[in-house]
């Protein structure tokens, strides 16, 4: 094959072809750079979103941890108060003791005072004082208290007799031991 194209046209065609190739390379490089920048921007944006969600999760976990600490401290406070309240509860049922004294007292006996000893080294005792018109009622009260449940031992401390206008009155005091519930 013989090439009949004059050299000038060949040269122009070569320059056009070279311009076309250079322009094409420039467009391809520009497109690659733009796509790279777009990819980097997208990657940066997705990383910011991922970092934001991780930060939100971290904040939620810190808040939950602080809430657990608060709950644990409140539970410890409640446990401490329950232990303290248990320490304040008496080993004796004083309502039962007073009810037993009231139900054991004969009708003709008037109790003037009931005192409870507070010696921590010994079980408490109840000191009862009262008045009656019969000696027998004092003995009856002592015997009933000795047989009643929360009491352990009963002893008469003193009996005094007084006479006023031909009426005899007996003033007594007795001590009653108490057993635990």
Image (spheres, rainbow, N blue to C red):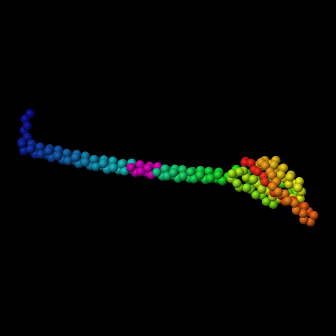
Q: Residue at x 76, y 54 (%)?
A: 126
Q: Where residue 44 appears, x then y in whole percent?
A: 33, 49
User: Please, which residue is most extreme toward the bottom here?
Assistant: 165
Q: Residue at x 37, y 50 (%)?
A: 48
Q: Is residue 102 left or right of residue 84?
A: right
User: Please, which residue is most extreme toward the top here?
Assistant: 1
Q: Is residue 18 magenta?
A: no
Q: Viewer-proximal residue, 84 or 130? A: 130
Secondary structure mostly seen in magenta is helix
Q: Viewer-proximal residue, 58 or 101? A: 101
- In the rendered image, the quadrant that contains the N terminus is top left
Q: Residue at x 25, y 46 (%)?
A: 32
Magenta-tinted stretch: 51-61
Q: Where residue 84 appears, x then y in whole percent?
A: 62, 53
Q: Residue at x 11, y 43 (%)?
A: 14
Q: Where residue 95 appears, x then y in whole percent?
A: 75, 53
Check the image and report above or below for 15 versus 157. Answer: above
Q: Is residue 98 left or right of residue 87?
A: right
Number of numbered discs on residues? 0
Q: Viewer-proximal residue, 43 or 112? A: 112
Q: Is residue 131 visible?
A: no
């Amino acid at each position: 094959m013989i090439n009949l194209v004059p050299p000038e046209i060949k040269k122009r065609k070569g320059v056009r072809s070279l311009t076309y190739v250079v322009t094409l390379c420039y467009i391809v490089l520009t497109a690659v750079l733009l796509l790279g920048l777009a990819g980097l921007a997208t990657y940066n944006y997705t990383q910011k979103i991922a970092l934001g969600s991780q930060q939100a999760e971290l904040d939620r976990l810190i808040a939950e941890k602080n809430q657990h600490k608060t709950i644990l401290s409140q539970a410890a406070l409640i446990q401490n108060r329950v232990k303290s309240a248990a320490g304040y509860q008496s080993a004796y049922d004083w309502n039962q003791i007073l009810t037993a004294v009231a139900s054991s007292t004969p009708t003709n006996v008037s109790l003037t005072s009931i005192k409870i000893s507070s010696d921590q080294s010994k079980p408490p005792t109840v000191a009862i004082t009262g008045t009656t018109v019969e000696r027998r009622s004092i003995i009856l009260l002592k015997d009933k208290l000795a047989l009643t449940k929360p009491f352990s031992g009963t002893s008469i401390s003193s009996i005094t007799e007084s006479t006023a206008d031909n009426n005899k009155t007996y003033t007594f005091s007795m001590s009653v031991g108490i057993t635990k519930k």
